[in-house]
Structures are given as C-alpha cells and as structure tokens.
C-alpha cells in the first residue's frame, strides 16, 4: 500500500513538474505547480513529517500560488508568453546544467553511500526529540521560548510590510 | 553594575525597552492618523512655522523616551551567550541611531512645510525602521539580525517611494527594493552556510566553534562569511555593491535620503563591526582580504566619480558611499581602537550628513535647483546658513577643526596600529581627492557672482520648525566635537571596552574583554 502511494505521489510530482515547465499558459502552469506541491506534501506525510506537509500545502499550495494566480490574472498576462531562453547559447547552457545536475544526482544514488556521519547523529537526536514532544512541539518550543523575541519582531515586520503596502497603493495623498 | 541573566521573560523586555517603545509608538502614530479628522492632514505644514502636528510630537517624544531607556540600560550587562547584547557597544550604537532619527525627524519639518508631504505614515514607518535598527544593534543571533535588517529595509523601501507623485521617488524605491531583496537573499544564504559550518545561529557559539576549530568545512565557512559580507556590503553600500545608492539617494525625498545615509548605514555598520571584528575574528583569514579590497575600492571609486557630479544631492550620495570606505578601514583594523573609532566616526558622520542634506534641500528650494550653478554667490545672500554648510562640508572632507577630521584621524590611527599601511595611504589620498569636490561648492558659494535674478525668482523661504537653529546647532556641534574631542573619544572608548564577562565557564574566545579604564 505504501509502495503504491509513494509511486503515485512520485509520478504525480515528476509528471506535474515536467508539464508545468512546458505549458505556454501561465495559469495552467500555476495550477500544475499546485498539484506538484500536493504530491510532495503527500510524500512528507508518508515520512511522518506532518508539520512540513501541512505548511507546504497551506503556504505554498495555498497562499503563494493564489497570489501568483491573482498577479497573473490582474496584470492580464494570461495569454502573453515569451521564451525566457533567447538564443541557442542560453538553451545549451540551461540544458547542460540540467544534465549535469541529473548526472550528479544519479551518481550519488548509484554509489549508495550515505552522506556525512554527522547527519545520522543529528537524525538520531531529532528522532528522540520528536518522540518526546512531537513534530509540532519541536518547531513550537524553540519558537515560543528561545526565539520569542524573534517572533515578536517578525510581528512588527509584518505590520511594517502591511502599512508600507497601503502607503504605496492608496489613491489620495502622497 | 547591573547584571541581567535573561532567566525570566522580564529581562528580555527590559533589555529591549528602547525598541519596544518605538514599536508601540509607531502603532500610536498610525492610530492618530486613522482617527484624525479628514482635511486635518492637508492643513499640516501648509504655512511654514505653523504648529507641529501631533504625529510629529509623538514621534519626537517616542525617540527621546527610547534614548532615555537606552541610556538607563547603560550599566547593565548580560551573559555573553544571550540572544540580545547588553554592553557598551550596543549603548553607543543606539545613541548614534536614535540621534540620527531625532535629527532627521526634526529637520524633516522644514521639508514637509515646503512640499506638503503628509506626515502620519512617514513618522510611523520611520519609527518602525528605527525599531529594526535597534534590533540589529542588539542582535547576538543571526536569525534576529536578519529579521531586524528586514524590518529596517522594508520600512525604508516604502519611505524611499513616499513621494508617490514623483517618478524619481518611485524609481528610487523600486531600485532599492530589488537590490535590497537581492542582498537579503545573499545574507540569508550566508546565514544558512554559517549554520552549516558551525551548527548554530547564535553568534557567541559560532565564534567559539570557529576559534576552537570545531567548525566543519573550510569551504562552508568561507562561503558563509563571504555571503554575509556581500549581503551586508549591499546594506552599507560598499563598492562594488553600491550601484543602487546614487539613484536611490537622489530620487528619495530629502528626509528619507538623510535617514538612509545616516541611520541605515550606521545600523548596517554596527552589524558589520560586531559580527566581523568580534564574532568572526577567528575566521579573519577568510574575510581579511575581501574587506581590504572592499575598503580600498569604496574609498577610491566614489571619490573619483563625485568629481564629475554637478547635482549636489547626487554628489553627497557618492560622498556617503566614500565614507563607508573610510569606515571599512576600522573594520579591517579589527581592534578595539577600530571599533570605537568607527562608532565615533559614524556619530560625527550622521550629524554632518543629515544636516548637510537638509541644508542643501532648503537652499536649493530657494534657488529653484540644486546643481552647483544654482549655488553661485549664495554665501553673501544667506550668510548664516551658508557658513553652516561650509562647516559641514569641511567636516565631511575632514578638515582640521571639525568632527570629521578627528574621526578620520582615529580610523587612520587604528589602521596604522593594525599594520594596514596600504589602506592608510589610500585613506589619506582619497580624502585629498575629495577636498576638490567639497571645496568647489564653497568656491561657487563665495567667489562666483550670483546668477541674474536668482534671489528674486523664488519666494523668500523661512525655515519651518526651528530649521535654522537646528542646522546652525549641528554645525557648531561638529566644530565643538572637532575642537574638544577628548571627552567624547574617551567616552566611546570606555563604553566599547565594556563587554560582557562570563560569570563562570570558559571565556568567550574572540571577544576581547577590555579592562575598564
């Protein structure tokens, strides 16, 4: 069952990603990207990373993609598309970068070694923490204790961003 | 000496009181604006010398209160590994930042009266930006530093585009925003790499990890330090990361330009000074060369470009970039003398630049233009304000009886003590080059004939809100600090030498615990 789910999500995300970059219409590209985010979130769920899965859907799949759609539709860019890659040199560069990345990735997978041992140690520590207070607790506890000040300053930062947007966008005055 | 151990939440509130005061006041200013009677805002500043608006008074009061709160924290120290710094360096930095804020807001009344700029959101955003600056000055953690820098930057992006009817202002805002976002990405990536190398975002722990050799991977460390330097280099406008500066400074409204050139630059420099010369002292080999070149280029290039400028505001923008170069000598020196010298220089430079920019704006409005030609013969028509401008320009150039001279002398001394002879020579030579464009203004003002009908073409302007008193006071203060620098320098040196002392456990490596003089 979990094998089946993994392959379903994996195919969904890879196919979605390929289709997304090949669409000419930005609106359908955005919709496909939402699909990719959902598939990736599904894989996070299978790894017991519930928090990241939820955040991925809420922030990326929800908020940011809706923002993209709004921008595309409000600016009426839905049908005007142009190719980013001008000239054969750029195409060649982009293509070879992609191939090189794929080569490194498959080499890493093929030789089967794990990465630095510290990653494993850190992983053990993380697992112990996760069992103690849960995934959400691991994120929330430092956020509301050690980094409470940072959280508060972030609140002020959001206020500044909101006021700034209104100042720049209002009709009268200025 | 009061010691806060940050064991309870109240300690955090007490330690952040200046920033808390500013943030709450920003909300109050916004509320005042929201509930103000319609039409009240258009009357504001309609007549020069008219009554000050409520938002203005609240803002000045808030900054004065924050200053008192900051000074009253003066003798408190915290543990060296706390999230928030509580030492003399932060105290002096806050003094400079809040002083710059007070000066800019006080001088902005004249500009608001002349142009009818709306006050409410201007003051609120300025307070929010100042909150961010205080957070930057206090941050001992890279995450807190990043959030503080973003709070400061986002408020200033908006302020740069505050004169929305003016396309140059919008251009300034967009340019600053795009380059600033670029810089933030570098900064964030640098923080991530440093975290990868040291396993912590806490600066004191990172310093320990680096100096004890526990930091993993030279490449990670060098990449992180380099990215951090690039990100902060954008914020202090060091060559070659200064491209946005002339356009942004020229297009932004004058008070905002003054705020960017003094407050934003000072806050970013405080971060550079603390992070590089104290926490990353163990990684000196990784950043010494880069900072050397940054300092050298930042001293040479803008001084040469400024020679060509006809527009006084743009000239002052290039001059502001050049001053970042002089300050970088203090960073390259990596010593107590370099740090206190740079802080003194920042203070002197903030007063001088804010007053000079406001004065250029004021005088240019009376002449209908701010190019060099418009200032011909001005010295005989407005003797007091012109004399003040001469003093300020001489201080920027670094002529002897001014604060600018003393500041340069101390940076030079710190550089020489650290064996940076090349940088010292460049500092002197580039200062000599800068004499030309500063003194050219003086020449035009006193030794060339006034253009035909220049004084009659614009209505006679009286400075609003005690403008003339403030500007002349700044010029006198610059002179006084140049004539009697002893006490000031002693105060700054004594304050910066006061660093947190670990009650028990190992002494934090890299932090020189200076003896109290």
Image (tube, coloured by chain):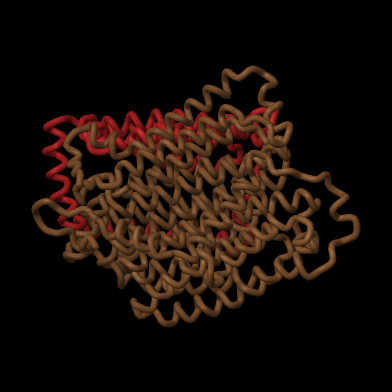
Chain colours: A red, B brown
> Is B430 in front, or is A5?
B430
Instruction: Determine which quarter of the picture holds residue A54.
Output: top left
Picture quarter with the N terminus of chain A: top left
Say whether residue B476 is visible: yes
Residue A166's x, y, as percent? 58, 29
> Is A123 in front, or is B133?
B133
Say whether residue A2 is visible: no
Residue B47's x, y, as percent? 73, 33
* B269 sits to left or right of B402: left
Q: Residue at x 35, y 80 (%)?
A: B419
> Is B154 in front, or is B353?
B353
Residue B333's x, y, as percent? 36, 71
Q: Residue furthest right?
A: B452
Instruction: Determine which quarter of the picture holds residue B160.
Output: top right
Residue B234's x, y, as percent? 49, 57
Q: Residue at x 58, y 32 (%)?
A: B121
> Is A40 in front, or is B395?
B395
């Amino acid at each position: 069952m979990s094998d089946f789910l993994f392959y379903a999500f994996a195919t969904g995300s890879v196919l979605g990603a390929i289709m997304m970059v090949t669409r000419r219409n930005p609106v359908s590209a955005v919709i496909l990207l939402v699909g990719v985010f959902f598939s990736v979130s599904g894989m996070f769920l299978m790894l017991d990373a519930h928090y990241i899965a939820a955040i991925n859907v809420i922030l990326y799949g929800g908020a940011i993609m809706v923002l993209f759609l709004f921008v595309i539709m409000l600016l009426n860019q839905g049908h005007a598309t142009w190719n980013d890659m001008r000239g054969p040199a750029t195409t060649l560069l982009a293509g070879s970068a992609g191939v090189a990345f794929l080569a490194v990735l498959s080499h890493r997978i093929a030789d089967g070694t794990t990465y630095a041992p510290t990653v494993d140690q850190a992983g053990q520590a993380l697992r112990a923490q996760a069992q103690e207070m849960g995934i959400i607790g691991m994120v929330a506890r430092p956020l509301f204790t050690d980094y409470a000040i940072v959280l508060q300053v972030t609140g002020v930062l959001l206020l500044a961003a909101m006021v700034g947007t209104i100042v720049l966008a209002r009709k009268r005055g200025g | 000496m009061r010691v806060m151990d940050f064991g309870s939440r109240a300690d955090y509130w007490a330690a952040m009181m200046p920033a808390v005061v500013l943030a709450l006041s920003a909300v109050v200013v916004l509320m005042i604006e929201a509930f103000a009677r319609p039409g009240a805002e258009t009357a504001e500043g309609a007549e020069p010398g008219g009554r000050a608006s409520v938002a203005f008074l609240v803002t000045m009061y808030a900054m004065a209160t924050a200053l008192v709160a900051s000074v009253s924290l003066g003798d408190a120290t915290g543990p060296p590994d706390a999230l928030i710094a509580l030492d003399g360096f932060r105290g002096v930095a806050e003094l400079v930042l809040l002083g710059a804020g007070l000066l800019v807001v006080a001088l902005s009344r004249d500009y608001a009266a002349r142009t009818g700029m709306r006050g409410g959101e201007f003051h609120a955003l300025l307070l929010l930006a100042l909150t961010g600056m205080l957070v930057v000055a206090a941050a001992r953690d890279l995450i807190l530093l990043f959030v503080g820098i973003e709070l400061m930057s986002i408020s200033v992006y908006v302020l740069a585009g505050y004169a929305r009817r003016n396309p140059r202002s919008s251009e300034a805002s967009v340019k600053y925003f795009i380059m600033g976002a670029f810089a933030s990405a570098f900064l964030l990536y640098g923080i991530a790499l440093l975290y990868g190398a040291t396993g912590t975002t806490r600066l004191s722990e990172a310093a320990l990890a680096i100096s004890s050799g526990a930091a993993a991977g030279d490449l990670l460390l060098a990449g992180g330090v380099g990215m951090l330097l690039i990100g902060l280099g954008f914020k202090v406008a060091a060559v070659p990361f200064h491209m946005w500066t002339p356009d942004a400074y020229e297009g932004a409204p004058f008070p905002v330009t003054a705020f960017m050139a003094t407050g934003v630059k000072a806050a970013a420099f405080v971060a550079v000074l603390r992070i590089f010369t104290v926490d990353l002292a163990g990684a000196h080999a990784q950043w010494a060369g880069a900072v050397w070149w940054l300092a050298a280029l930042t001293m040479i290039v803008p001084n040469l470009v400024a020679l060509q400028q006809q527009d006084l505001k743009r000239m002052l923008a290039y001059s502001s970039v050049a001053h970042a170069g002089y300050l970088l000598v203090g960073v390259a020196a990596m010593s107590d003398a370099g740090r206190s010298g740079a802080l003194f220089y920042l203070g002197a430079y903030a007063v001088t630049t804010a007053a000079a920019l406001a004065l250029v704006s004021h005088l240019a409005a009376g002449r209908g233009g701010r190019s060099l030609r418009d200032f011909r013969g001005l010295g005989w028509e407005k003797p007091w304000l012109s004399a003040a401008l001469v003093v300020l320009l001489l201080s920027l150039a670094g002529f002897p009886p001014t604060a600018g001279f003393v500041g340069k002398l101390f940076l030079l001394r710190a550089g020489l003590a650290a064996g940076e002879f090349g940088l010292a020579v460049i500092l002197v030579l580039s200062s000599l080059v800068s004499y030309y464009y500063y003194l050219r203004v003086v020449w035009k003002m006193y030794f060339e004939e006034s253009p035909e009908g220049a004084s009659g073409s614009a209505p006679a302007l009286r400075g609003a809100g005690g403008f003339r008193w403030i500007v002349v006071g700044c010029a006198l203060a610059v002179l006084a600090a140049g004539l009697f620098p002893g006490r000031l320098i002693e105060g700054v040196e004594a304050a910066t030498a006061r660093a947190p002392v670990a009650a028990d456990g190992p002494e934090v490596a890299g932090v020189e615990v200076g003896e109290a003089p």
